[in-house]
Image (spheres, rainbow, N blue to C red):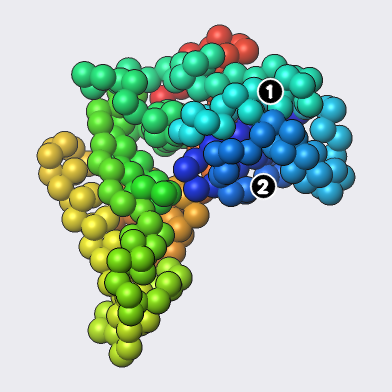
Amino acid sequence: MLLAVDVGNTNTVFALYVDRRAIVSWRLATVRQRTSDEYALALVQLIEMAGLDYRKIDEAIVASVVPEANIALRWMCRDRLNCPVSFVGEDIQVPLEVALANPSEVGADRLVNAFAAHHQYGGDLIVLDFGTATTFDIVDAAGTYQGGVIAPGINLSLEALHAAAAKLPRVGVQKPQRVIGDGTVAAMQSGVFWGYVGLVEGLVARIRGEFAKPMQTIATGGLAPLFAGATEAIEKVDRSLTMTGLVHLYTLSKTGEEARS
């Protein structure tokens, strides 16, 4: 079995694959101080609850934007799972040309998403990820990463609004039926939801205009389905995009075959 791990600023996703087929996955809160033993305890219990044997994990691949988690995950794989582990950007490079002055600035997750989208869909693409930050990444038909846009994430914006305004409560993200809210909570939900729809539509239109070519928008992240249903700017939702990219990267590292466009 292959263990694929996507370490984000808010959540860490673990998934097990057999022959490139997803068997099971879990989402844990990202805790920067978590030790290798704590990772192992949580993961082994989850694997056993799924009726699987963690000793059958042959190898692991990790994309991480949280440097503090990397050593603990390396030690977990080495000492508890007894399997080799490869980190994107350190042990495995994403086979995309990055047309930026400083390619190292691009997070591993964004490169993996761009690589996976290029491999899965081809053509000129906008990859929209609803994560801790809302990111728009551009990959052209030749497989070159052209840059992107970073905006505050939806939940981050809601938390900031609650923290900075004494009378505003903490609210969840949902699609209001009306734009004009009939109370504080409804007004906040409308502002965040329809405000982000406007952000997505506006940025996608500007990116397409600047790129001057037809572009497909692929959305990923937990909130992608919610927002995709509210705007035609998002043409496809692929919630497993990052994990698909990790598995394909692993396969390429073993076979040496070139990525298909």
Image spot of residue 56 (x, y percent) = 83, 27
Is residue 167 shown to the viewer in this render? Answer: yes
Residue drawn at x 63%, y 32% is: 4
Q: Nearer the viewer, residue 24 or 54?
A: 54
Residue with the mark numbered 1: 75
Q: Quadrant of the C terminus?
A: top left
> Is 59 situated left or right of 56 in this image?
left
Amino acid found under the numbered disc labelled 1: Trp
Residue drawn at x 25%, y 28% is: 146
Q: Nearer the viewer, residue 48 or 225?
A: 48
Is residue 174 shown to the viewer in this render? Answer: no
Q: Residues within 10 Å of mark 2 (few under 14, many from 20)?
A: some
Q: Quadrant of the N terminus?
A: top right
Whole-angstrom CA distance, mark 2 to mark 1, is 20 Å
Is disc 2 in contact with disc 1, using a CB cutoff of under 8 Å? no
Image spot of residue 255 (x, y percent) = 61, 11
Residue drawn at x 36%, y 69% is: 162
Image spot of residue 22 (x, y percent) = 68, 39
The quarter holding residue 126 reads top left
Which disc is residue 26 wearing?
A: 2
The quarter holding residue 185 reads bottom left
Q: Earlier in the sequence, mark 2 or mark 1?
A: 2
> Is 212 situated left or right of 22 in this image?
left
> Is 139 situated left or right of 130 in this image?
left
Q: Residues within 10 Å of mark 1 (few under 14, many from 20)?
A: some
Label 1: which secondary element: helix
Image spot of residue 83 (x, y percent) = 74, 19
The answer to whether 93 is drawn above or below residue 197 in the figure is above
The quarter holding residue 193 reads bottom left
Amino acid found under the numbered disc labelled 2: Trp
